Amino acid sequence: MSEGAGKKATYNLPIGPIHPALKEPILFTFKMDGEVIQEVDFAPGKAHRGVEWMGMRRNPVQIVHLTDRICGICGVSHSLAFARTVEQIAEIEVPERAHYVRTIIQEFERIQSHILWAGVAAHELGFDTLFYLAWRVREESLDVIEYLTGNRVNYGIIQIGGVRRDFTSDQFPRIEASLKYYEDLLGKLLNLFLDDKSIGLRCRQCGVLSRDDALRLCTVGPTARASGLNMDVRQDSPYAAYGDLDVRAVLPDQYLSGTNGDVYDRIVVRLLEVPQSIGIIRQCLDQMPPGEVLWETKYAKILATCKKAVGEAVGRVEAPRGECLHYVRMDGNSNPHTWKVKASTYSNQMAWLKILQGEQIADIPIIIASIDPCMSCTDRVAIVREDGTDVLTKEDLTRLSVEKTRRLMQ
Amino acid sequence: MKFLPTVAEVLRQITKTPATNIFPAKYLPPSITGFLRSVGEGKASIHPPIGTPPKFRGKITYDRDTCTGCKLCIRVCPANAIEFLPETKRVRIYVTQCVFCSQCNDACPTGSLVMSDEFLLATEDRYAEEMIVE
């Protein structure tokens, strides 16, 4: 950039709330200097659905199926996080086998989510052939999920105190066939995504998030791991069957020579988590103990236990996009007093402000998609005021948080 | 495989059967309703529909004779699709509201609620007669 160009007037470029480059509604405002982004601002909250409001008018057994519908792709992560909070409050002991069933289904979800994302990334780069290939091979995992749970999306398999369908040993060959399919495919996928010249040119040194920024902005999941943070809920605070299994966070330097924290590293992390998931499912199938899968088959007793429960708990789950957190407070009524959902994109979205700075207009779609955003899952609040102000400052938010905590403590 | 990896893929597509279900007719008929009428009269044949998998969750069926009116299904239904009829102590299920989780089937102590294999349930009328089970 010459000195004269810097003095030129900047202009604003709005993208969204509805835009072909975005998969979900969100409003971006870019302050542009020519083709280069100077500043970024974004306004989420365009897809608020009132899920928590609906949940507070239902009992936990009903909410489990509502949590399935928070996200269409990582549905089981939300159900699992919610079921874990209620199980902690009501002190329900989940059978060992149910933990393994939950782990297997979560790992299949991760496989389909990462391949879905890989296809979307290829599409955002304009590489539609690869997009079609990725989405075609993703079908296999959806078929297995349908075979195991009965549904392709919104699986409806999690229940408070276990799972609703057991995996029988005659289903194992089908699972194994699918794992083999992905294992054979993996070399091809890695070759097509990582050795491709144009993907390398578009993604290397693009949308860089340094390790310090990733830490400071509290990013989670593959976005954090691509910047070199060794964090994974499955490894750091194991839930379900992960404590029995060998799970290590996938970091880009296991494949590349170093960590850059760019879009390319995020592709590497997500693609390498597919073989990791295959390994985890294999371990689960080998170690799966016999026994029941549901703590109590009489629903009247599950409902009564949930009604009696008093207390609060937090459930953390490593969703394909990062940590998914549910907070529930029960006060002895059948419906929860408070239910708070924090999807992983809520933590990751602030990284946009950093990684979009200084990039080109043409790279906006892939950089936005590189954190795998899921706006409808994230939007928990929408401010509607008559005077038209819909921006809350940090001080406002802190004050509101303190007020809400005081309300909860009463 | 290093160069042009899609060429082999494209060639393989020529001999492959489609991944999707086969269209009922071999060629698109000039009139769908006319074609269906001739199928009904036995003059034409269609590709049979793909069967449903085991434990499929389709339209709900309700046996009102074995139902005891315990209301447990109403308490577990996430979509509030079940209504209690106090005069007869039986329930009414609105299929257009149902999310097909089959949780009421698991909860029902007498097994009066069962999911059928019927899945062609698209309708414009939320309160159509066949969309209300009682």
Image (cartoon, rainbow, N blue to C red):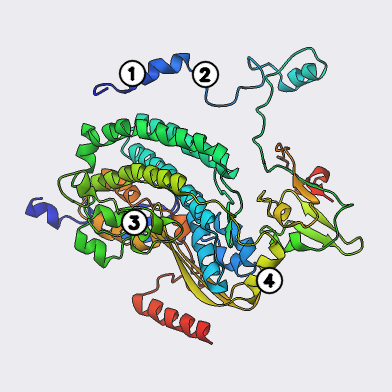
> Do circles 2 and 1 both sit on a common chain?
yes
Q: Are marks 2 and 4 in contact (CB under 8 Å)?
A: no
Q: Which residue is mark 4?
A: A304
Q: At which x and y percent is residue B99?
A: 66, 51
Three-letter amino acid code at the position of disc 1? Val
Q: Secondary structure at mark 3?
A: helix
Q: Which residue is mark 3?
A: A221
Measure the C-alpha gap from mark 2 to mark 3.
39 Å
Which corner quadrant of the image does residue A271 belong to? top left
Q: Secondary structure at mark 4?
A: helix
Three-letter amino acid code at the position of disc 3? Gly
Q: Which residue is mark 2?
A: B17
Q: Are marks 1 and 4 in contact (CB under 8 Å)?
A: no
How many numbered marks have been drawn onto this rendered protein structure? 4
Pointer 3 local density, CA inside 10 Å: few below 14, some 14–19, many at least 20: many
Measure the C-alpha gap from mark 2 to mark 1.
18 Å
Q: Which residue is mark 1?
A: B7
Measure the C-alpha gap from mark 3 to mark 1.
36 Å
Which corner quadrant of the image does residue A276 belong to? top left
Q: At which x and y percent is residue A362?
A: 27, 43
